[in-house]
Image (cartoon, rainbow, N blue to C red):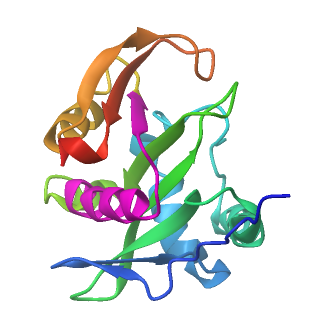
Amino acid sequence: MPTITIVHMTPPLRTERLIIRDWSSTDSEEAYAVYGSPEVSRWLTPSMRTVGDAAAMRSVLEAWVEAQPNLIPPAGRWAVVRQEDDAVIGGLSLRLLPPFEEDFELNWQLRPDTWGNGYATEASKALIRWAFDQGLEEMFAVARPNNHRAIATARRLGMEWVGETDKYYDLRLQVFRCRPSDL
């Protein structure tokens, strides 16, 4: 039987301006400012329903924290924290894409008032490097064709556009791929 290694992001990843760390249920108010925002939630996949309030967000975070040790490494969900004021400004995740759960998806969500500062690119680059250091051979980002911000971020990350598909989430999506040699 193969040995499964549980990979936690301890210590957290650090970039010039950000900290990428495990979520805590105490992050519920700040997380709700991200995932409860209509500007963000309109782009979320069906697997992430709209969060109605901070109490519901707390339940979601508790589920994420509980599930984290059981995910296939290097999968996980993490908070993105701005170092200058210790504010949770977003989230990142690396997870298996449905329906076959063989392709890893990188995704990012930020509070709308932080858009346009390069945080999504900065945080995602750090997570990409970390995931490849854990042995991941490739990852994907998917975006609805009219989600121009996500598509632009995937391109800034150096991800290669590989086409359009309805394979994931039963939605028509643009697909971008990144491999270690792309860095």
Q: Residue at x 67, y 37 (%)?
A: 47
Vertical order, 26 against 129 (above or below) = below
Instruction: Please tell me which residue lies in front, 66 or 86.
Output: 66
Residue drawn at 67 percent across, 56 percent down: 72
Figure check: 30 above or below 180: below
Q: Is residue 125 magenta?
A: yes
As drawn, which residue projects farthest toward the right?
Answer: 1
- The residue located at (18%, 35%) in the rendering is 155
**Residue 143 rendering spot, x and y as whole percentages:** 39, 27
**Looking at the image, residue 138 lies above or below residue 60:** above
Left or right: 55 in relation to 148? right
Dominant SS of magenta comes to helix
Position of 168 compared to 42: left or right? right
Q: Residue furthest front?
A: 1
Which quadrant of the figure has residue 97? top right
Give x and y (percent) for residue 79. Answer: 47, 71
Looking at the rendered image, the quarter that the N terminus falls into is bottom right
Quadrant of the rendered structure where residue 70 is? bottom right
In this view of the protein, which residue sits in the foreground, 129 or 157?
A: 129
User: Residue 88: horizontal and vertical position, in percent?
Assistant: 40, 75
Magenta extent: 120-142
Measured as percent of width and height from the top left, residue 183 is found at 18, 49
